[in-house]
Image (cartoon, rainbow, N blue to C red):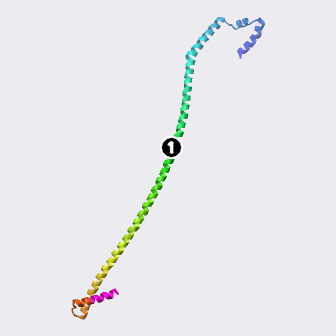
Amino acid sequence: MNLYLLLANAAPAAAEKGGVKETLEQFGWNPWAFLCQVISFSIVAFLLNRFAYKPVLAMLEERRKRIAEGLANADKIKGHLADAQKSAETILAKANADATKMIEETRAAAKQVSERENQRAVQQAAEIIQKAREAGEAEQKRLMAELRKELSRLVVDTTAKVTGKILTSADQQKITSEANKELAA
């Protein structure tokens, strides 16, 4: 703000005294010093431009390119990731379908095996029952035969004791056949 006031005060004074040269002298302007400063500024600007700004700008441009490449690569990776996720979902869906199919096939096979085993068990049970009946009938026949034999012997012994005589074989056979007829009836 002081410079503004100084210039504002100097402008009417310069107009009164008569010129720019006097105004420049009033401010202490030296043409040789000004020229040296211009040359010095030009050299510094050239050196900064050549050795500082250009390398810095080149480095910034290189970083900008790297960032752009990184963003492009990130977009590509996102696309690949989306494709991979779709592939994974497709594979999982197929695997789930295959697993469901296998489970259904296994259940069907297990049901068939179970039915076959049930039929086999029923058949074996029927065979066991039939064998048991046959064995029971054979045992009953054997016991009946033993019972007849024993009964015949007892009848013969009892008859021999009651009659008090010794029975001949013909008498024993006759008594045995009569006892068997009565048992059969």
Expressed as whole percent of the image width and height from the top left, the position of residue 56 reads 56, 20
Amino acid at pointer 1? Ala
Q: Quadrant of the N terminus?
A: top right
Query: What residue is drawn where x is 53% and y is 40%?
Result: 83
Query: What residue is drawn where x is 56% and y is 23%?
Result: 61
Expressed as whole percent of the image width and height from the top left, the position of residue 4 reads 72, 15
Expressed as whole percent of the image width and height from the top left, the position of residue 156 reads 25, 89
Expressed as whole percent of the image width and height from the top left, the position of residue 151 reads 29, 86
Q: Which residue is denoted by mark 1 in the rendering? A: 88
| 35 left or right of 160 in image | right
Query: What residue is drawn where x is 55% and y is 16%?
Result: 51
Quadrant of residue 29 within the rendered picture: top right
Front residue of this view, candidates 57 and 22: 57
- Residue 125 higher or lower than 21, as above or below: below
Quadrant of residue 10 within the rendered picture: top right
Residue range corresponding to the magenta coloring: 175-185
Task: Please state the total of marks drawn on the protein image.
Answer: 1
Quadrant of residue 82 within the rendered picture: top right
Q: Quadrant of the C terminus?
A: bottom left
Query: What residue is drawn where x is 75% and y is 8%?
Result: 14
Q: Main secondary structure of the magenta part?
A: helix
Q: Secondary structure at mark 1?
A: helix
Label 1 environment density (alpha carbons within 10 Å; few <14, some 14–19, many ≥20):
few
Residue 183 in the magenta stretch? The answer is: yes
Front residue of this view, candidates 80 and 58: 80
